[in-house]
Amino acid sequence: QVQLVQSGGGLVQAGGSLRLSCAASERTFSRSAISWFRQAPGKEREFLGGMKWSIGATHYADSVNGRFTIAGDNVENSMYLQMSSPKPDDTAVYYCAATGPRRVGVPFSDDEYVYWGQGTQVTVSS
C-alpha cells in the first residue's frame, strides 16, 4: 500500500519561511509524479506544483511561482515544499499526492492523483 507521510506545517508569520515534507517509498518517489495541493475553507483544492523525479520535470502554479519551491531528495525519498514570504492568503490545509507509476508527466488536476498524504495545516499570520 502506498503511503505518503507529511510533516511540517503550523503557524508562520507573513514574510517568514516554512518547509513541508512528504515522505514516500522508493518505488513511489522514483516512478510517480508527486505534487502539492492546498485547500482553504470554502474553496476548491488548488494545485501548487509538482515534480516527477524520473524525468526531471517540475511545474508550478502561477499563484506560487517564485515564492514556493519544490525539491526532491532521492536518498530520503522525500519531496519538499519550501514556502518563502508566505502571505495570509496562503493559509490552508496542504496535501501532497502521488500519481500511479504509469501516469505521464505532472498533471495539474487532483483527479489524476491516486495517493494522498494526511494533510497539514499552515496558518500565516499578518
Image: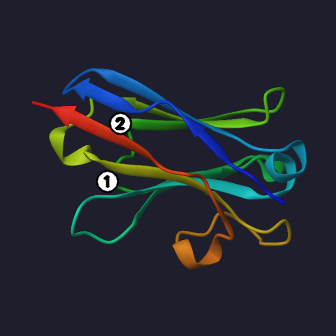
Is disc 1 surrounded by few (<14), some (14 to 19) or many (20+) residues within 10 Å? Answer: few
Where does residue 67 sit, x and y in percent of width and height? 35, 36
Residue under numbered circle 1: 63
Residue type, mark 2 in image: Arg
Asked which secondary structure carries label 1, the reply is: loop
Residue under the point 35% across and 31% down: 10
Q: Is residue 57 above or below residue 121?
A: below
**Coloring applied to the structure:** rainbow
Instruction: Answer with left or right where residue 2 lies relative to residue 17.
Output: right
Question: Disc number at residue 67?
Answer: 2
| Outermost residue to the left | 126
Where does residue 119 sit, x and y in percent of width and height? 49, 50
Is disc 2 surrounded by few (<14), some (14 to 19) or many (20+) residues within 10 Å? Answer: some
The quarter of the picture where residue 2 lies is: bottom right
State the quadrant of the C terminus.
Answer: top left
The quarter of the picture where residue 13 lies is: top left
Q: Is residue 59 visible in this depiction of the protein?
A: no
Residue under the point 61% across and 69% down: 107
